[in-house]
């Protein structure tokens, strides 16, 4: 038996505007049957209806760090806090919190997620959860001699993920936590899987490290007795592209997710587009504000027609894993961007990165994207600071 709901705004994401005073009809299993405009006199609920969200970047296993970090420390200070606090909880606590926060995200309307893991504490929960996850097994190691051992460890971690039946593969973390050798080796493993996630240009400290061998992150690494990446005089993204070339010749047809992009510039965009045929650009605005009170250059990204996606990052650098809060932040800081476009980033583009666009991302007949109410929207259908999301199916 089919069901139907009426709403003031139906964001199908098939068009550039929502349907006003519309409906969505769907099967009991959530398969969308059709959408359209309500007849005169039909009761219409004063909410927006959207497809399920895709959280394009999360670190779910860091949920035990919720509320424990100081804000505004910059990246070097944030790393110090991670190193001091990340291991306070055992696997049982981390698994319990993974379950709680995945359940909350599902209830809030997240249908799929691109998640980072450094251990196996989230695997069993992910394997049985309705929320689809592709897991990126992130590696670290600043010393060249660590490369072989780190890659052996992540290969074993992938075997554990495979045993649980979840989609997972190795991926590099960032330029500043990895030797050149490990960055290329882990990139090669990620490219082999068809998917790669990479923390890119998250802070000016990262750029200073590569461009001039200076700044807070450089000093932090040196004080800790850690090797630093070579000073190239170029951005960290261009350095990553060079390390990709050492792993596999360009061009790259694999799906590559560049995460954060706070210091992105035009020549970086040009360099990435020259070699990456399926590059996606994740923004995590509330995390960027939390750590260093900065935001990515969204107008520049839009002018270049980039495939933007939206993530929450982790509860070490965010107060919640609420996608609506991220979209409200984008809307408040870039009010010229239509709500419909922001929702394409948060739903359809994320689904495309995960190659799940045939099922997820839009209210298209035949898809099962999840159907979500968003309350307290304004008179134009845009989300507000009072907006809340709730899954219908």
Image: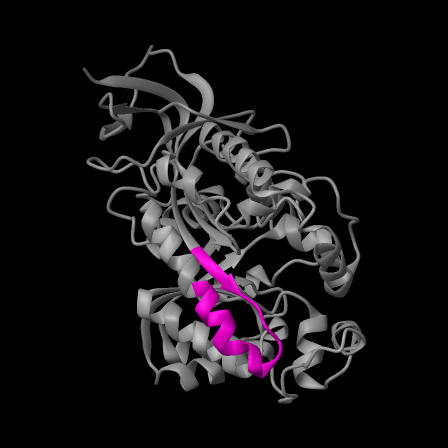
Q: Is residue 195 left or right of residue 176?
A: left
The x, y position of residue 14, in whole percent, is 30, 43
In which quadrant is the C terminus drawn? Answer: top left
Nearer to me, 74 or 102 = 102
The x, y position of residue 200, in whole percent, is 56, 68
Badge count = 0
Residue 112 picture quarter = top left
Q: Is residue 306 left or right of residue 355?
A: right
Nearer to me, 256 or 123 = 123
Mark yes or no: residue 257 visible.
Answer: no
Q: Is residue 82 left or right of residue 323?
A: right
Residue 307 picture quarter = bottom left
Nearer to me, 99 or 146 = 146
**Part of the protein shown in magenta:** 136-154
Mark yes or no: residue 181 visible.
Answer: yes
In which quadrant is the N terminus drawn? Answer: top left
The residue lying at 65 percent from left, 43 percent from top is 89
Q: How is the image coloured?
A: one colour
The residue lying at 66 percent from left, 45 percent from top is 318
The x, y position of residue 217, in whole percent, is 74, 72
Q: Is residue 253 left or right of residue 338?
A: left
139 is within the stretch colored magenta: yes
In the rendered view, tell whether residue 369 sits above or below residue 250. Answer: above
39 is within the stretch colored magenta: no
The x, y position of residue 101, in whole percent, is 54, 34
In the rendered view, tell whether residue 11 sits above or below residue 272. Answer: above
In the rendered view, tell whether residue 293 sits above or below residue 123. Answer: below
């Amino acid at each position: 038996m089919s069901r139907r709901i009426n709403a003031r705004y139906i964001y199908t994401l098939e068009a550039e505007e929502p349907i006003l005073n519309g409906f969505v009809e769907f099967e009991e299993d959530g398969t969308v049957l059709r959408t359209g405009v309500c007849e005169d006199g039909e009761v219409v609920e004063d909410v927006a209806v959207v497809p399920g969200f895709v959280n394009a970047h999360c670190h779910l296993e860091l949920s035990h760090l919720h509320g424990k970090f100081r804000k505004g420390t910059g990246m070097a200070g944030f790393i110090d806090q991670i190193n001091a606090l990340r291991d306070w909880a055992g696997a049982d606590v981390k698994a319990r919190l993974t379950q709680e926060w995945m359940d909350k995200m599902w209830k809030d309307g997240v249908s799929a997620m691109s998640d980072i893991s450094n251990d196996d504490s989230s695997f069993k929960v992910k394997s049985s959860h309705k929320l689809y996850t592709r897991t990126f097994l992130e590696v670290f190691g600043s010393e060249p001699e660590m490369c072989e051992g780190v890659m052996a460890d992540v290969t074993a971690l992938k075997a554990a993920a495979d045993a649980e039946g979840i989609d997972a593969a190795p991926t590099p973390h960032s330029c500043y936590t990895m030797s050149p050798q490990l960055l290329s080796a882990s990139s090669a493993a990620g490219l082999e899987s068809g998917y790669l996630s990479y923390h890119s240009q998250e802070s000016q400290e990262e750029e200073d490290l590569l461009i001039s061998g200076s700044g807070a992150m450089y000093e932090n690494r040196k004080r800790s007795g850690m090797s630093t990446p070579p000073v190239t005089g170029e951005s960290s993204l261009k350095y990553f592209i060079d390390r990709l070339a050492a792993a596999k010749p360009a061009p790259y047809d694999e799906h590559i997710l560049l995460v954060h992009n706070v210091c992105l510039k035009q020549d970086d965009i040009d360099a990435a587009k020259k070699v990456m045929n399926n590059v996606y650009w994740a923004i995590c605005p509330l995390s960027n504000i939390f750590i260093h009170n900065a935001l990515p250059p969204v107008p520049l990204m839009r002018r270049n027609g980039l495939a933007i996606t939206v993530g929450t990052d982790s509860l070490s650098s965010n107060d919640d894993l609420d996608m609506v809060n991220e979209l409200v932040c984008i809307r408040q800081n870039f009010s010229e961007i239509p709500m419909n476009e922001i929702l394409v980033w948060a739903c359809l583009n994320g689904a495309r990165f995960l190659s799940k666009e045939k099922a997820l991302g839009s209210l298209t007949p035949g898809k099962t994207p999840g159907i979500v109410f968003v309350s307290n929207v304004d008179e134009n259908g845009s989300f507000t600071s009072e907006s809340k999301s709730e899954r219908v199916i």
